[in-house]
Image: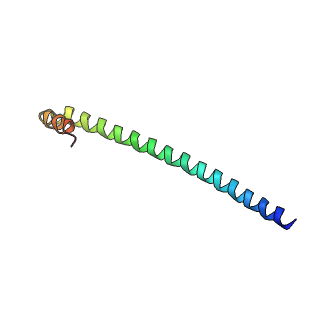
Amino acid sequence: MKTILIIGIILVVVIILFFIGKWDAKQIRRAEKDLKKAIDEDEQLTEYFIRKAHPELRGLYLERKKNGG
């Protein structure tokens, strides 16, 4: 009887840890998606600013972006 109780407790703990890990992975994927979206929006704002406010800098910006910088 004691071993069945111990096995049951271990099983419950494993199941709880599994769902915590699954939830944590979901949160990480959501954070990665949000970060990627923020980076894309930042790049769009930078391109807009350079295109509208400083058109003479546009060539330099595009060249730098093309070179990976």
Q: Residue lying farthest bottom?
A: 2
Q: Is residue 5 left or right of residue 67?
A: right
Extreme residue in the right direction = 1
Residue, x 17% and y 39% (percent of image)? 64
Report the label total: 0
Q: Is residue 31 left or right of residue 43?
A: right
- Please tell me in which quadrant of the rendered image residue 57 appears: top left
The residue located at (16%, 35%) in the rendering is: 63
Locate residue 3: give its quadrant: bottom right
Q: Which is more toward the observer, 1 or 42?
A: 1
Q: Who is closer to the viewer here, 11 or 65?
A: 11
Residue 11 location, x and y as percent? Answer: 74, 57
Q: Residue at x 65, y 51 (%)?
A: 19
Vertical placement of 42 versus 10: above or below?
above
The location of residue 50, given as percent across then percent down, is: 20, 36
- Is residue 19 toward the left or the right of residue 37 in the image? right
Task: Work out whether 30 lies above or below 56.
Answer: below
User: Where is the N terminus found, in terms of image quarters?
Assistant: bottom right
Q: Position of residue 2 (x, y in %)?
A: 84, 67
Q: How is the image coloured?
A: rainbow
Given residues 43 and 69, the one toward you in this image is: 69
Is 12 or 7 nearer to us in this picture?
7
Q: Residue sitting at 55 percent across and 45 percent down?
A: 26
Screen quadrant of the C terminus = top left
Query: For residue 5, what is the image quadrant?
Result: bottom right
Tell me where residue 49 appears, x and y as whole percent. 23, 37
